[in-house]
Each structure stands twice: as C-alpha cells, then as structure tokens.
Image: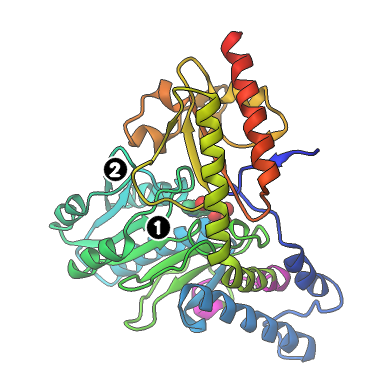
Amino acid sequence: MGMIYLDHFSTTPCDPAVVKAMLPWFGEDFGNPHSLHGPGRKAAQAVERARESVARLIGAEAREIVFTSGATEANNLAIKGAARHLARLGDPRRRIITVATEHKCVLESVRALASEGFEAVVLGVDADGRVDPEALRKALEVPTLLVSIMAANNETGVLQDIPQLAGIVKAAGALMHVDLAQMAGKMPVSLKDVDLASVSAHKMYGPKGIGALYVRRRPRVRLEPLFSGGGQERGFRSGTLPTPLVVGFGAAAELAAVSMAEEAVRQAVLRDDLWAQLQGGLPGIVLNGRTVPRLAGALNVCLPEGLRALDVLEACPDVAASTGSACTAAEIAPSYVLTAMGLSAQKASQCLRLSVGRSTSKADIDRAAGLLIAAARTCQTN
Ligand SMILES: *Cc1c(COP(=O)(O)O)cnc(C)c1O
C-alpha cells in the first residue's frame, strides 16, 4: 500500500511507453537534429515525426508547432512575442486582455508587458470561475493587440467556452492565445479562431522540460523571439532541440489521442465516486466550480468549517494532493484562483485540489476517501 497520487494537474508520471521511446535518443542516437550528417538526420526525422504527433493531437499542421521548454515558455513567447512584434511594426494598439484565474506565467507575462508601456486588462470571473463573454466584448471596445485565456484551469478544472470567446476576439480584430496545458491530451481541442496555443508534455504523461507553441500560419502570426541564437524552430525559438524529450512528447501525444475519450469517462466516474464518498463522510463539504463543465479528473473541494486543507494533508501523508495555495517564504498565500471566484482567504485555505488521472484506480479512490475523511476528523477534534 503505497502513496496515492491525486495531483495529476500538477504533473503526471511519464508513461512507461514514453520512457521506452525516449531511451535510445539519450544513448546511441545522440545526434544533433540540426546537423546534416547521418546521426543528425536520424534525430531530425524523429523530431519531425514527434512534431506531427503533437500537431495531430490539437488539430494543427506540423509546420505550426514550435517546440519550447514547456508551457511557461510557450505562454511567454506567445504573449510577449506577439505584443512586441506588433509594437515594433508601429501598431498603435496597446491593450492586452487576460483573466484573473490564468496560470502565473500568463499573468506575469502580461504584467511584464505593462512595464513596457502596454496596457494590461485582467478580467474577473464568476463564482464558478467562468469569464463573462459580455465583459470580454466590453474590454475589446478599446482596440486590443492580444487576448490570452486558458481552456481549462489547473486548480479547478473549470473549462472556458473557448470557441465562443475566440469568436468574440476574432470579431474585434485581436490575436487570440489559449493556454491548452491542462486541456490538451484530456479532451479534443478546437483551434477555430485561435492564433496561438500552448501545450506541455508533463501534463499529459510525457517528460518535463518540453512543450510547444502552436503558431497559426493562415493567416500567418508573427512573433518576436525571446532568445537570440541560431534561429532554430523557424526563427521562433533558438537552441538545440532536446531530441529525447521531443520524441517523448510525440509518444505521449499519440497515447493521449488513442486513450483520451475512454479515460475521460473512466476518470469522471472515479472523480464522482470520490466526491460522493467525501460528501458522505464530511457533511458541509462544498464543490468548487460545481455548475459548469470541468475536466473529467478535477475535484476541487472546500472542506467543512474549521478545517485547513494544509493540516488535513499533513495528517494524511499517503495521499499526494494539493491545497492550491502557494507557500511564499514564511506565509501561505491563499489561492488567487479561488479568491478570484469570490472565496474569502479563510475559505480558500479550506480548499483541497484532488486530480484523478490515468494511473488512478477504484481502489485508490476508496482508500484515499477513507484516509482523507479520517484525517479531517482527526483535525476536527484537535
Ligand atoms: C502546468 C501549467 C503551465 C506551465 O507548464 P510548464 O510546462 O510546467 O512550464 C501553464 N499553464 C497551465 C494551465 C498549466 O497547468
């Protein structure tokens, strides 16, 4: 009886088939994919096959995929790259719109641009974590360069209606960037009216340290690169590609494509089972984002009054889950995603993020529910 991992939105284990696919590229097949000799060409072919697999997963063309070190870099490249490129061309627009519940790397990229003279507009969300399309339309009344909205939230699993929001953005003539880090590999994605989209391998059973940015070709989206260098990845991203990680990403994308429909159904059943058991054992527990579509594995709950999520997890070392709060220095900051949904700092500290994944079994759910309920009861009496 080992540890039960219920933190798949934080990262996922590499699928054994992914590890197997990567191994030769760490060893005998070490060639530089940008070299023109035999070993280089062999690596380049493997990279291009992986590029096709990643593209196919999100419905893009291989030529539209730029490999990066992960979704953090892809988000930075999309947001800063697009804004700086257009500003350099003399575009008078300055407005960049995003949402309060985005990943830190999006919020911080937009904030960095604000210090370069761009105007940052951060839209709020409703109690279920959704963006109001009318608020977006209103914000777009001022000519806007770019809008960045995530498809699925990494703390709550709440889905935004990207086709609808992207349509509004397109009608207003702004570029649309979507952070797909949580959605890709879990659900089919739509790139309709989307110009830029970020993905990450380690959120979909691939290796850490590799991701990609989708850059639309028709009409062509241009970006100022973040790095100066040899001009790899069509000039968007200099640096030697890590062949093993790229190959692993491609293998993970192929596995996700074949298993995602079945997994979504299986994980939703397990997630609902866990929720039912927690409700049974902990009266007063509340589900966050309950009335809106969510990712199949997502379960973000607010524990009953008087319970701190951190204390419960500490009393429950065999369950690996997350509180959503970030520990900064000595303080524990409440999750800004949950406070943006209207929860008080106090309430946010009661919230637990459980995320079911491909490695979760029914036995895991039963055991985790028992352990969490017992831990909560211990904390309640203390
Ligand atoms: C994990 C995550 C990121 C960051 O991805 P990395 O590949 O770890 O840099 C960005 N956005 C979302 C929504 C994520 O879940």
**Residue 55 percent coordinates (x, y):** 52, 77
Locate residue 170 relative to residue 21 in the image: left or right: left
Residue at the outermost top position: 382
Locate residue 151 relative to residue 235 in the image: left or right: left
Name the residue beneath numbered marker 1.
151
Dot 1: within a 10 Å radius of its alpha carbon, few (fewer than 14), some, or many (20 or more) residues?
many
Color style of the picture = rainbow
Helix, strand or loop at mark 2 = loop
Q: Nearer the viewer, residue 157 or 64?
A: 157
Q: Quadrant of residue 319?
A: top right
Name which residue type carries label 2. Val
Dot 2: within a 10 Å radius of its alpha carbon, few (fewer than 14), some, or many (20 or more) residues?
some
Residue at screen point 52% across, 78% down: 56
Q: Nearer the viewer, residue 174 or 192?
A: 192
Helix, strand or loop at mark 1 = loop
Name the residue beneath numbered marker 2.
125
Locate residue 143 relative to residue 257 in the image: left or right: left
Q: Is residue 7 magenta?
A: no
**Residue 310 percent coordinates (x, y):** 58, 25
Q: Which residues are magenta?
A: 233-247
Q: Is residue 242 magenta?
A: yes
Above or below residue 162? Residue 98 is above
Q: Quadrant of residue 286?
A: top left
